[in-house]
Amino acid sequence: MGVRRPVLLSLWGLMIAAAARSVTNLAWLSIALFGTPFVGIATLSVVVRRRDPEPFAAGWATVYRAAAGLLLVAAAIGLVAAAGRVVRHGSGSAVTQVGPTGLLFLLAFVLGWRALVGSTPRRAAIVGMVVHLLWVPILIIDLAMGIGRRGSVPAHPQLWGAALLGVVALAAAMSMLALVGFAGSSSLVSARVRGAAAL
């Protein structure tokens, strides 16, 4: 990975800082919104060949499982909140009522589950890339489709918003864990040990 890992971690840190600053200055929000998809793609490109299960780096196993588990919880909450539209408004098109964000929550749940049960850098990075590529366009489409339509607002908008924010934040965490959470393949670990012994 060479120099690319610290560079990508620094870029993710910049995206997180920009998102935090956007609370007081919306100009920072554009950096986070348009920057994270590119950082997500770059992260996946670095680990795309690491598709086999690898041992976790020291101390990162619990962090990885906690992040993946919380992602599943957030996605599940989002699915329940989105489906609440159908429960509250039984008439009309169920697809329109649930909205594209329901698809985003479903994708996050499926990809998060895959990353949890088959822990590989590639699967972890895919979660971050997919969520950060799709969440802004999907949210725009969802809002546009919902204008003037009965049932366009989720049954529990605060819960829905918190779930969406949680999925986006935890997807970024999964991308960062793809860079730092794994020790590498067994052959790579052995090579590192031999190299350290030679020194």
Image (cartoon, rainbow, N blue to C red):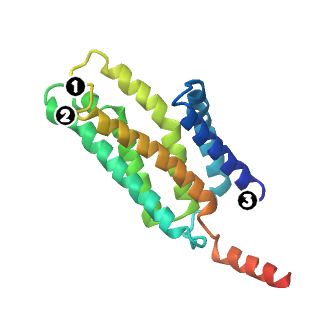
Single out the residue that lies furthest toward the bottom.
197
Tell me the SS state at disc 1: loop
From mark 2 to mark 3, how far is it between C-alphas?
47 Å
- Looking at numbered disc 2 in the image, what kind of residue is underneath it? Val
From mark 2 to mark 1, how far is it between C-alphas?
8 Å
Tell me the SS state at disc 3: loop
Q: On the rendered image, what quadrant is the N terminus found in?
A: bottom right
Please rate how many residues cluster around mark 2, counting C-alpha atoms within 10 Å: few if below 14, some from 14 to 19, many from 20.
many
Residue 151: give its label. 1
Please state the horizontal and vertical placement of residue 50, each as a whole percent of the image.
62, 63
Which residue is the site of mark 2?
Answer: 86
- Looking at numbered disc 3 in the image, what kind of residue is underneath it? Met
Which residue is the site of mark 3?
Answer: 1
Whether the residues at callouts 2 and 1 have beta carbons within 8 Å, the answer is yes
Residue 54 position by quadrant: bottom right
Tell me if residue 50 can be seen.
no
Please rate how many residues cluster around mark 3, counting C-alpha atoms within 10 Å: few if below 14, some from 14 to 19, many from 20.
few
| Sooner in the amino-acid sequence: mark 2 or mark 1 | 2
Please state the horizontal and vertical placement of residue 134, each as a whole percent of the image.
48, 36
Single out the residue that lies furthest toward the top.
148
